[in-house]
Amino acid sequence: MSQFQSLRNHFLIAMPHLEDSNFSGTVTYICEHNKDGALGIVINKKLSQLPVAELFAQLELPNPNSGLAESEEVVPAIMEGGPVHHERGFIIHTGSADDWESSMTVTDELALTTSVDILDSIANRRGPEQFLIALGCAGWEGGQLEKELQDNTWLTCPATLPVLFDAPAEQKLQAAAGLLGIDINLMSSQAGHA
């Protein structure tokens, strides 16, 4: 039996032959991975550019006392984080998980937060320095992700902050593949094993 290896703080890069509409052409950031399963956020599938007020309304947040929330200012693109809990907000961000009500530490530099307090801080420009907002997440049961990796569904590599936060959404797939020295555009969409 092979030893379990966690892919926490790694990117899952969809192979070109992956046809699942939820994951085709995606990069997923893995926030948690243990023997019971995995949780990730798709980081390159834009939902839209939303005014802050519309984001707050979609997430059914109480009216924040925020001039920004009432303005038409646009927050960075909101990502379609995955097919699970699509009505729920997930924020990957720099800084400590201890600063927010419902947050988990991913690395010393990164946390995943689902509580309203971080959105209020972002709206009031007190939020974390770098963040990515997604609606929904991706989830795998124990052994499911490992099976998909055996089936050559994904490439994996350690995550980097520049790809996570700085690369435009439409460039994240190539940027993540580039960490492996691969041009994803040159890969075949035919699945197979050597």
Image (cartoon, helix red, strand yellow):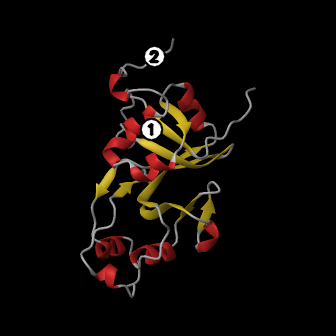
The N terminus sits in image quarter? top right
Please give the residue where the numbered disc 2 appears in the rendered image.
192
Please give the residue where the numbered disc 1 appears in the rendered image.
176
Between 109 and 16, the one nearer to me in the picture: 109
- Whether residue 118 is situated above or below residue 151 in the rendered picture: below
Q: Residues within 10 Å of mark 1 (few under 14, many from 20)?
A: many
The dot on residue 79 is none
- Amino acid of disc 1: Ala
Residue 101 in picture, x, y percent from top left: 59, 74
In the image: residue 106, left or right of residue 152? right
Mark 2 element type: loop
- Image point 38% across, 28% down: which residue? 184
- As measured in the structure, the alpha-carbon distance from the residue carrying label 2 to the one carrying label 1 is 22 Å
Residue 142 in picture, x, y percent from top left: 64, 42
Single out the mark in the foreground, 2 or 1.
1
Between 133 and 17, the one nearer to me in the picture: 133
Instruction: Specify whether residue 172 is in view.
Output: yes
The answer to which image quadrant residue 103 occupies is: bottom right
- Image point 32% across, 59% down: which residue? 77
Residue 152 in picture, x, y percent from top left: 50, 25
Between 193 and 106, the one nearer to me in the picture: 106
- Amino acid of disc 2: Gly
